[in-house]
Amino acid sequence: METQDFNTTVVVDQTPMEVFNAVTNVRGWWSEEIDGDTSNVNDEFLYHYQDMHYCKVRLTEVTPGKKVIWHVLENFFKFTNDKTEWRNTKIVFDISRQGKQTQLHFTHVGLVPDYECFEVCEEAWTNYIKLSLRNLIVSGKGQPNPREGGFNEQIIKKWNLR
């Protein structure tokens, strides 16, 4: 049975370690507005995009050159009725050698078409993975969301992000 979880793949000429280093440089491809560490097991970070999306993520698996798994601990979307979407989902970055190239297979386990956010999230993840992360891997320059001014204490308290 085929999974309905959102997934996408990119193939690049760089090494698995170069891909791994780009994946764990979350500020370089997803958002400059990341608070916390993003490269070791049990690291936690906060992400936000304007007042539309906030999430708290923990790294649960980190195998250099091979795999990174995030667990979404908390999440808020301003635009969905179901406030539990993304909570307790996993975001998986599988890295493997394919001949002389490296394949990055991205899966957001639990992000399925039944979610209210699926279309928006599918479009966003596709952009972040196939464009921004790929460009960071290939050229050293991604297109993350720009810094908006940080997580102020009011936002952190309002959304119980710590």
Image: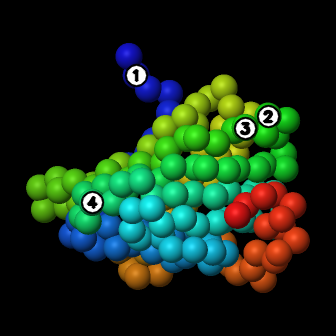
Q: Quadrant of residue 138?
A: bottom left
Q: Is label 4 in a helix, a strand or a loop?
A: strand
* Residue, disc 4: 63
Amino acid type of the residue tagged 2 in the rendering: Asp
Real-space Cα separation, disc 2 to disc 1, in angstroms: 25 Å
The image quadrant where one finds the C terminus is bottom right
Seen from the viewer's position, the closer of residues 148 and 58 is 58
| Above or below: residue 47 compared with residue 32 | above
If you read the primary sequence from the N terminus, does the residue marked by circle 2 or circle 4 appear first? 4
On screen, residue 100 versus residue 113, left or right, reads left
Position in image of residue 146 (x %, y %): 68, 78
* Residue, disc 2: 82
Real-space Cα separation, disc 3 to disc 2, in angstroms: 6 Å
| Above or below: residue 103 compared with residue 12 | above
| Residue at position x 69%, y 38% in the image | 85
Position in image of residue 15 (x %, y %): 21, 69
Position in image of residue 3 (x %, y %): 44, 26
* Residue, disc 1: 2
| Residue at position x 62%, y 29% in the image | 113
The image quadrant where one finds the N terminus is top left
Amino acid type of the residue tagged 4 in the rendering: Thr
Seen from the viewer's position, the closer of residues 27 and 133 is 27
If you read the primary sequence from the N terminus, does the residue marked by circle 3 or circle 1 appear first? 1
If you read the primary sequence from the N terminus, does the residue marked by circle 2 or circle 1 appear first? 1
Q: Local crowd at mark 1 within 10 Å, few (<14), some, or many (≥20)?
A: few
Q: Is label 3 in a helix, a strand or a loop?
A: loop
Real-space Cα separation, disc 3 to disc 4, in angstroms: 29 Å
Query: Do we see residue 11 in this rendering?
Result: no
Position in image of residue 147 (x %, y %): 70, 81
Q: Is label 1 in a helix, a strand or a loop?
A: loop
| Above or below: residue 68 compared with residue 22 | above
Q: Which mark is residue 35?
A: none
